[in-house]
Image: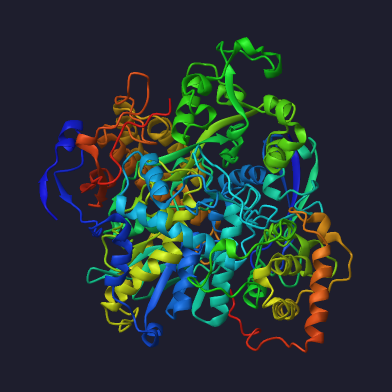
Amino acid sequence: MRLTLKVWRQKNRNTPGEFRTYHTEHASPDMSFLEMLDVVNQELILKGEEPIAFDHDCREGICGMCSLMINGIAHGPKQAVTTCQLHMRSFKDGDTITVEPWRAGAFPIIKDLVTDRSSFDRIIQAGGYISASTGSAPDGNTIPVAKVDADKAMDAAACIGCGACVAACPNGSAMLFTAAKAAHLSFLPQGQTERYQRAINMVTQHDEEGFGNCTNIGECAVVCPKEISLDTIARLNRDLVVAALKGLAPSTGVSEAKAG
Amino acid sequence: MSSNQNETGTRTGVRTVEFVKALDSRAPGGPIEQRWDKHRFEMKLVNPANRRRYSVIVVGSGLAGSAAAATLGEQGYNVKCFCYQDSPRRAHSIAAQGGINAAKNYRNDGDSIFRLFYDTVKGGDFRARESNVYRLAQVSLNIIDQCVAQGVPFAREYGGYLDNRSFGGAQVSRTFYARGQTGQQLLLGAYQALCRQIAAGTVQMYPRTEMLDLVVIDGRARGIITRDMVTGKVERHVADAVVLATGGYGNVFYLSTNAKGCNTTAIWRAHRRGAFFGNPCFTQIHPTCIPVTGDHQSKLTLMSESLRNDGRIWVPKRPGDTRDPRQIPESERDYYLEERYPAFGNLVPRDVASRNAKQVCDEGRGVGPGGLGVYLDFADAIKRLGRQKIAERYGNLFDMYAQITGENPYETPMRIYPAIHYTMGGLWVDYNLMSTIPGLFVAGEANFSDHGANRLGASALMQGLADGYFVLPYTIANFLAGVKPGGLSTDTPEFAEAEAEVTSRVQRLLSINGHRTVDSFHRELGKIMWDECGMARNDAGLRRALKRIPELREEFWQNVKVPGESGDLNQELEKAGRVADFLELGELMCVDALHRTESCGGHFREESQTEDGEAKRDDEHFAYVAAWEFTGDPGRAELHKEPLVFEYVKPTQRSYK
């Protein structure tokens, strides 16, 4: 396959970036998108140019490290697939493909296509957990969980924290991520004790990180590689209302949670 | 330690060893079911008020690392945790699919701690330490409880109780699972516990930070040298104890199921500083991976071996038969596992399934591009159970397969081929998970571990969490109680020397400016390792590899091309440092494989097989852990032996007929 790539190149956070055009004749339909970038990079290195920096790790769609806006769509044209699992058979010989990093204020660019998503970690640090110190747990079967609840918790827990939801959202909101994390725990009996405090803490941190508000546009759910449902956001909003009715305020120290 | 002449060294002619020294495992004696309890009581404790004065470095944030860092933080120690990913949640434990074993016996089907212990020792082909394995089986119970309390969404039955399945040929249902993503859910549990401690200020997290050396002072591990992967800044970190939980080294083969970033650098640097390397040649090859499609292939994707519960494995009887599999009549198909192993059929252990696949492909009966594949066929299962039932059980795996290959496994058989998946070898540790360097602990896949020469399915997650949640917090306390806290700055000659070495190595890599990319060296090393030290090994091939690897390493340092600069995010530079270490480790693996002239578990020496082609152990000469000491040249490592004694599980020839 012959391809033309328009790739965002940016030396670092403080240097302005630009699109540069590359051509390759060595792509094949069996390659993953990242393997195609590998090929381009090998060619660049041998020509004495700097290769394109991009994040990736497991290359099997589960670690959430890979990203990329491909022709303007987070993780590219196929639904429910991460960039690492997108194959070049989804493109045609002769195509021109535009490749950009996630674009969001709360995800500053580190270099080329690599962004800083540590804001997600700080949302979890603000309360996205169940406080259960090692050794304090009762036998696993003393806490029965209705299968329907366990399945819903699992649906939400499938979030891989890639950030596609933020990149796709016109508001740059991370509500789908935050809501998925909260819903995973709020569907389980173990997660009830801290449920409302958790909701308000996580959303407060979400806002402090500079993510935008949710206005129910729904692009996030369309691009989500794990098909997290918008319903999680409704559920989180309900929990926020309950937290307000209970008069809960964000616990102190949230905004001082250490940078990840 | 006692010394005696090493016969194996002279017999095989490996240019390695003059002396062997026996290593002390410090495993407690007495009845096996009381050893851990007794040991826990005898270990020293650190007063809660004193704990914050002690600091611990944890490198790696997978199951073992996150669990250890979180738990040590909860207990009040000062913890620093490092990972190369952009977030600790992304460590490669996340990719484990199938499940986690625990001897809960919730199914009332005959499981027990002793049975899990027995199965693990036997499954490891009698090359693991009994005391450790028994402890692992004991704490498996606590792991499930802890994970449930954290909110891990394990699969449930309709009554709300935890569901189990049988996995990897086990005869009891002891595997707990969370759909096809058990690893991710367990890791998120540990990560969330870690986040809670980061917020509490007990753990300081350093993502996108790579450990490039270990600092040893007066014989004790006292710190590490790191490189910030974004700014390139090289930094010194001091602590009272160091934990390496940096995973396995399967990427020495270039193609493996590991994440692209998985590497050996942390443990290899520690090895060079004096930590012995245990059984480096013990690698596991997973039978159900998606075959290679071409030279561009960057990694291999595993599909859960639960597929073997319903899929039937076959190849055409006639070599070179390229017909569409659906056109090949039953009479011309060879269901070779069902044929050869009637009792276990398609569910034989991983090493047996992998070796048989290689054998039929070597006979020219492999399928797909390059003839490196066998069929995994669900046609019968779909006929028997219906398409919907199969979709319920394996839907996500079928989707993934279709996504990668462009073929529909509901319509045509899957093609699978074995791939490097896990390394049983790793840094040698004693019963306390401490390496031969005092103060340096090693956990999870990074240590030589409890799996002997072959790991059973759903046992890696169990071991990582056992080490992190329930073993290290005790044994590190015991170590710390014996030393004075703090009292050391990073301003010592040892730190300065280690930092200078790291910096000059980085500069050297950048200054070579040769003609070959890092990847091209890595691929070539991987091919040597796969061909000569992969699924089957023999004397001549290993000697070829031992000649070729040092040559390749030499060429690397003359001719590698690493673009860019050091004070910047530079992914080629990161890779170059890792491949340089793989080029040393690969040689040690071949030295180990050559010296062990027996077959055991995943280590199949063609010279040592039974009449019907199964792995044949040599307990008389090889019932030991080979622990290698670095002497300046990986090809001349010095062999130490930890004899293995089997008091409870009597070694027998494994048979799955």
Camera-nearest residue between B251 and B122: B122
B260 sits to left or right of B438: right
Residue A53 vertical placement versus A258 (above, below): above
Horizontally, is B68 left or right of B98 in the view?
Answer: left
Figure disc tally: 0
Q: Tell me if A216 is positioned left or right of B286 in this view.
A: right
The residue at 58%/19% (across/down) is B315
Nearest to the observer: residue B100 or residue A182? B100
Q: Is residue A163 above or below residue B558?
A: below
Q: Position of residue B377 (x, y in %)?
A: 65, 26
Q: Vertical placement of B111 versus B545: above or below?
A: below
Where the N terminus of chain A falls, by quadrant? top right
Q: Residue at x 42, y 30 (%)?
A: B531
Between B394 and B423, the one lying in front of the other is: B394
Tell me where residue A80 appears, x and y as whole percent.
76, 49
Residue B88 in sight from this viewpoint: no
x and y, in percent, of residue A15 in the image? 68, 69
Q: How is the image coloured?
A: rainbow
Q: Quadrant of residue A153?
A: bottom right
Residue A202 visible to the viewer: yes
Quarter the C terminus of chain A occupies: bottom right
Residue found at x 67% / y 71%: A191
Q: In x, y percent, where is residue A112? A: 67, 60
